[in-house]
Amino acid sequence: MNASERNLKETARIYKALGEPTRLGIVLLLSRHGSLSCTEIGERLNVASGSTLSHHLKQLADCGLIELSRKEGTYHYYRVRREVLERYLPPDLV
């Protein structure tokens, strides 16, 4: 697979992840607030189920949009990977 094909696949994965409203909300929330815990993300976006939130976070991490920034006890904090986000979203959104 050449670089152009890899870029096309990455772009498709990113936009597929961002095409789901909750995941887009997570990315925008993290881009505005920096690093947040899963609990904070769930509370701010009214995501009732922890397993649903975990699924969304995994999808976003797998495509490279977010990353685990730190762990504090049982809390996991995530942050957006700004260099990736800026390639795919208009500057007025981030």
Image: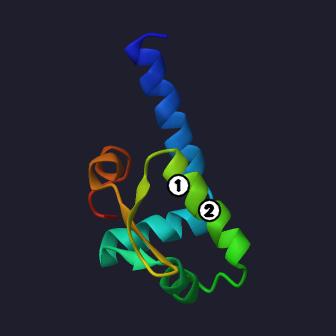
Answer with left or right where residue 20 lies relative to residue 61: right
Picture quadrant of residue 50: bottom right
What's the residue at 52%, 28% (across, down)? 9
Residue type at mark 1 is: Leu
Question: What is the quadrant of the C terminus in the image?
Answer: bottom left
Name the residue tied to disc 2: 56
Q: Name the spot of residue 49 as percent of width and height, x first.
A: 73, 80
Disc 1 + disc 2, Cβ < 8 Å: yes
Q: Nearer the viewer, residue 37 or 92?
A: 37
Q: How is the image coloured?
A: rainbow
Name the residue tied to disc 1: 60
Answer with left or right where residue 16 lies relative to residue 89: right
In the depicted structure, whether residue 20 falls above or below residue 1: below
Helix, strand or loop at mark 1: helix
Q: Nearer the viewer, residue 66 or 28?
A: 66
In the depicted structure, whether residue 32 falls above or below residue 40: above
Q: Name the spot of residue 52 as percent of width and height, x first.
A: 71, 70
Residue type at mark 2 is: His
Answer with left or right where residue 11 lies relative to residue 20: left
Q: Name the spot of residue 3 as percent of width and height, x first.
A: 38, 16
Q: Residue furthest front?
A: 73
What's the residue at 26%, 57% (across, down)? 91
- State the mark number for residue 76: none
Label 1 crowd (10 A; few <14 / some 14-19 / many >=20): many
Helix, strand or loop at mark 2: helix
What's the residue at 46%, 22% (across, down)? 6
In the depicted structure, whether residue 3 falls above or below residue 40: above
What's the residue at 53%, 55% (across, down)? 60
Picture quadrant of residue 2: top left
In the depicted structure, whether residue 70 falls above or below residue 11: below
